């Protein structure tokens, strides 16, 4: 989505390869741009700040740093920080890593890992150094952070969505209901909803506002 929510980028894929991009407007869901040049996408979506072009292609909140997974000549996939025309390979070993997401303040980002045990690596936003790791009981396919920065959510191979606080990374709750792996989890721009997509063929929308807040009339 663009920062104002008025445009949505769609990518046509053939297996793991992107075959083209188009942009639709979200008021009437009509196409506004077809066969978009990837270099033009940031401008069409309102800039690079917090732009998430793909799970492996995410800009920092200030738009100055690109966190990207690339394939080296030997076939190895590595994460790189791209800033001011320079590229730095992340020092951590993230073999099989699928997704990354920045914290809203830009000081750190989270990367999925497939070690033993699998989990999430929390990395310094400037150096890429691993600050801490959050172990998971199953392989993590997707990760996102609430717009206010207070919660981190993961979706795993076991079909469970897990929600953590971002201070001590303690588990807040588990969301059950999907019957297959979770391949995508995203908070809405206002943070009041969480959408999860699963291999069971369903998308679930979760309410993230406490019932007590909704009853008091203070919530949306």
Image: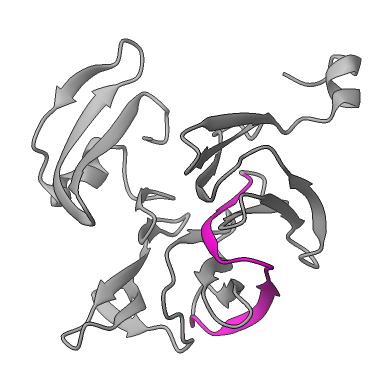
Q: Measured from the top left, where is residue 209 in percent x and y?
A: 77, 30
Left/right placement of residue 178 relative to residue 218 reads left
How many marks the image carries: the answer is 0
The vertical placement of 140 against 24, above or below, is below
Residue 113 against residue 3 in the figure, above or below: below
Q: At 50% from the left edge and 39% from the top edge, which residue is drawn?
A: 200
Answer yes or no: is residue 84 visible: no
Residue 152 percent location from the top left of the image: 66, 54
**Above or below, 205 relative to 123:** above
Name which residue lies at 28% across and 36% down.
9
Tell me if I can see residue 201 in this picture.
Answer: yes
134 inside magenta stretch? yes
Q: Position of residue 50 (x, y in %)?
A: 44, 50
Q: Nearer the viewer, residue 82 or 194?
A: 194
Quadrant of the rendered image containing residue 33:
top left
Q: Could you say which is closer to the camera, residue 180 or residue 81? A: 180
Displayed quadrant of residue 196? top right
**In which quadrant of the rendered image does the C terminus lie?**
top right
Query: Relative to residue 165, is residue 28 drawn left or right?
Result: left
Q: Residue at x 56, y 77 (%)?
A: 124
Q: Which residues are magenta?
A: 127-146
The answer to if 25 sits in the magenta stretch is no
Q: Residue at x 29, y 16 (%)?
A: 29
**Residue 156 picture location, percent across and down:** 58, 57
Would residue 22 appear left or right of 49 to someone viewing this image? left
Quadrant (top left, top right, bottom left, bottom right) of the N terminus: top left
Q: Is residue 115 above or below residue 170?
A: below
Question: Which secondary structure dominates the residues rendered in magenta?
Answer: strand
Task: Report the side of 78 relative to 22 (left or right).
Answer: right
């Amino acid at each position: 989505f663009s920062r104002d929510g008025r445009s949505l980028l769609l990518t046509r894929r053939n297996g793991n390869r992107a075959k083209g991009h188009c942009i639709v407007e979200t008021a009437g869901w009509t196409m506004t741009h077809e066969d978009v040049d990837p270099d033009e996408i940031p401008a069409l979506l309102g800039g690079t700040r917090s732009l998430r072009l793909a799970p492996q292609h995410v800009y920092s909140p200030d738009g100055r740093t690109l966190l990207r997974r690339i394939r080296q000549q030997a076939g190895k996939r590595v994460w790189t920080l791209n800033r001011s025309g320079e590229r730095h390979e992340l020092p951590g070993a993230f073999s099989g890593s699928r997704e990354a997401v920045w914290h809203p303040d830009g000081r750190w980002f989270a990367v999925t890992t497939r070690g033993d045990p699998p989990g999430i690596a929390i990395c310094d936003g400037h150096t890429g150094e691993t600050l801490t790791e959050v172990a998971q009981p199953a392989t993590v396919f997707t990760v996102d952070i609430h717009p206010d920065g207070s919660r981190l959510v993961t979706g795993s191979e076991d079909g469970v969505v897990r929600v953590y606080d971002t201070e001590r990374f303690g588990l807040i709750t588990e969301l059950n209901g999907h019957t297959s792996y979770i391949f995508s989890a995203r908070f809405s721009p206002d943070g009041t909803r969480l959408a999860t997509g699963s291999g069971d063929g369903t998308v679930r929308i979760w309410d993230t506002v406490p019932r007590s807040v909704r009853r008091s009339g203070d919530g949306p």
